[in-house]
Amino acid sequence: MDLPASTIHCDIVSAHEQIYSGDVKLCVAVGGSGEIGIYPRHAPLMTTLKPGPFRVLQTDGEEIVFVIGGGILEVMPHLVTVLADTAIRADDVDEAAALRAKEEAERILATRTGQLEFQQAEAQLIKALEELRALETLRRRTKR
């Protein structure tokens, strides 16, 4: 794979589909130890991803923000692969649905029902909060 030294190929996939594939200038992820910036020729790395935003800076200067529901990040000098539990473009997040999911999860957590229901509600709350956080990040970036 011959790529210019100024780009790195990025693939974002989930168990169900390929979310994104393209050459980029930069990727920014939330890894197990914090935020990670990945430029072309980055040292090989493998880490877990926390739920949160995953940003790519395309070669034309456009930034795309994704909401990743956790997963694995593999970095090679010319390739970034995200194996996401779930992933969606922040542009595609339904804010009203995320707010409803957040409220429903908070209601379930407040009633402290069974352990399984509690864990599912906690996961739903985390996902909704990350979607809302990604939307806020996107809004801040488009105001500049």
Image: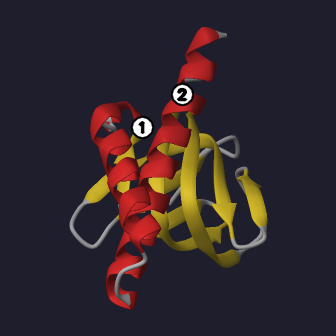
Q: Relative to 97, does residue 120 appear above or below in the rendering?
A: below
Q: Mark yes or no: residue 84 visible.
A: no
Circle 1 crowding by C-alpha within 10 Å: few under 14, some 14–19, many from 20: many
Q: Nearer the viewer, residue 44 or 97?
A: 97
Q: Residue at x 37, y 31 (%)?
A: 91
Q: Is residue 44 left or right of residue 95?
A: right
Q: Position of residue 62 (x, y in %)?
A: 53, 24
User: Which type of secondary structure does the marked residue at label 2 adopt?
Assistant: helix
Q: Position of residue 107 (x, y in %)?
A: 38, 59
Q: Nearer the viewer, residue 144 or 21?
A: 144
Residue beneath disc 2: 138
Q: Residue at x 27, y 41 (%)?
A: 97
What amino acid type is highlighted by mark number 2?
A: Leu
Q: Residue at x 34, y 38 (%)?
A: 93
Q: Relative to 106, does residue 112 appear above or below in the rendering?
A: below
Q: Position of residue 30 (x, y in %)?
A: 66, 59
Residue beneath disc 1: 90
User: Which type of secondary structure does the marked residue at label 1 adopt?
Assistant: helix
Disc 1 to disc 2: CB gap under 8 Å: yes
Q: Mark yes or no: residue 125 visible.
A: yes
- Residue 78, by quadrant, is bottom right
- Residue 104, by quadrant, is bottom left
Q: CA distance from mark 1 to mark 2?
A: 7 Å
Q: Position of residue 15 (x, y in %)?
A: 27, 73
Q: Residue at x 23, y 62 (%)?
A: 17
